[in-house]
Image (cartoon, rainbow, N blue to C red):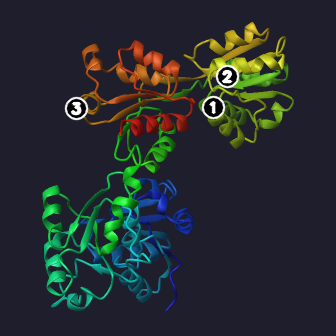
Amino acid sequence: MSITKGKVYLIGAGPGDPGLITLKAVNCLAKADVVVYDYLVSSLILDYAPAAAEKIYAGKMGGKHFAEQDEINGLLVRKAHQGKTVARLKGGDPFVLGRGGEEAEVLRKNNILFEIVPGVTSAVAVPAYAGIPVTHRGLASSLAIITGHEDPSKKSSSIRWDKLATATDTLVILMGMQNLAQITARLMEHGRKASTPVAVIKDGTLPSQVCITGTLRNIAGRVRQAGLEAPAVIVVGEVARLRESLRWFDSLPLFGKRVLVTRAGSQAGSFEKLLAEHGSLPVRFSSIEIKPITTCKRLDNALANINKYNWIAFTSVNGVEIFFSRLRALGLDSRCLSGLKIGAIGPMTGRALQKMGITPDYLPAEFTGRGFITGLKKRQVGGQMFLLPRAEIADDEISRGLKKLGAAVDEIAIYRTVRPRTNKNRLRELLLRDGIDIVTFTSSSTVTNLLSSLSQGEIAGIRPKIACIGPKTARTAAAAGLKIDIIAGEQTIPGLLAAMEDYFRKEA
């Protein structure tokens, strides 16, 4: 029988943190026509697949199945027979209690090409994020990984609790939350001491991670009292004692903090990723959208006569991207900028230029308009011509400063910031009813646009901490009636993040 032209990649997506996916998995996803994904697979991981790829949810959680296994098997076979490249994304590792072996057998039976892409199993990664090594030279030299939820159609259990109870130093039990009381009872019944340490970790590797510790005798009651629900990983053994001394993830200054991201949707993703890496829960509520000014005859004229300028000064990533987009639309590229000096207000703008093949000639030591002008005083720019492509509502601090230095300035608005349609009830819930811990503002326009939906009384009642990327943004927020808690020392996104961490580290 001939092999179908389609192919299925059985991919381990890791335990939840999108940063734990493997490079090979990312490369396979990039080739996918279809993605069939499970519960707990992050949307950030799905973004590695082509935008045009068909994405099909087939998750299972706590006994609730969106799709039965037979349906999933049939789906994989059908899509592959259509000649599609299918990425089957499974939580953790596909061959560690993930039914990947069953899916591979079905594919082989139907003469479909397949490849196994191992993933980081939750059996190891989740305890690690809770500060629990599953093995330790002084405490545990052996490990068993056990399912706590067997196939209900089986006539009898294949798990030999009488043998496993004392066979290995560490037991890691997956999918065992529904049967936690019975599991602990069986372990004690078959010789494991009632005082054996146990940790139950929900949402492991995610900013919502919760870890409950206890012993075999009391863990079921503690978990029930805490209201923990599946999915969770259960760790039984002396290594669970190490959590208090080795916990790191949930000790991060921003761990579990709900952070409102107000910057434009096109830029929010990178900030959200950084926040998640530092343990916080980003919540997107964009208060601005960036709109290029598409009929900008002044910019076209400037590009047509680019040789009359000595400098181009970029004040934002948006300015860089829109400027070079227009350059390409006119059939030009960076070669036409040969001989010009290029300035960038900060490192993010500088990196945006580098993506365009341009290394900035000038970056100020202080990433502000004032800092930009101060650094140019030593460069003798008097009599030189500056092109300043920027936002429509930008202030004139840089242009005024350049003119004081004796330079001529051609200031051209190439984009505008507009207020997107917002859900006012959702905003009030987030800001006034303990829905958010920190509100971040990355420009004055994010402040004015977000607050325009609220009354003065509502603004006075805002509960979260307010974090601003710099003094100018902070002044706008203060003038609007907000109490400013955090101002970044370095006016960049990493600088804002660092200032937030310093604030909560001091509060701890």
User: Could you tell me how far apart the alpha carbons at marks 3 and 2 are, in whole angstroms?
Assistant: 41 Å
**Most distant residue in the front direction:** 138
Q: Is residue 26 left or right of residue 419?
A: right
Identify the mark nearer the N-term, 1 or 3: 1
Give the SS element for disc 2.
Answer: strand
Q: Which residue is mark 1?
A: 322
Task: Report if residue 37 is visible in the image.
Answer: no
Three-letter code, disc 2: Pro
Work out which residue is located at the far right of the displayed protein and give it. 339
Residue 143 higher or lower than 370, as above or below? below
Labels 2 and 1: the sequence-earlier one: 1
The residue carrying mark 3 is 433
From the viewer's perspective, tell me whether residue 275 is left or right of residue 356. Answer: left
Q: Earlier in the sequence, mark 3 or mark 2?
A: 2
* Mark 3 crowdedness (10 Å alpha carbons): few <14, some 14-19, many ≥20: few
Q: Tell me the kind of residue under disc 3.
A: Arg
Q: Residues within 10 Å of mark 2 (few under 14, many from 20)?
A: many
Distance between mark 1 and mark 3 Cα atoms: 38 Å
Residue 151 percent location from the top left of the image? 22, 82
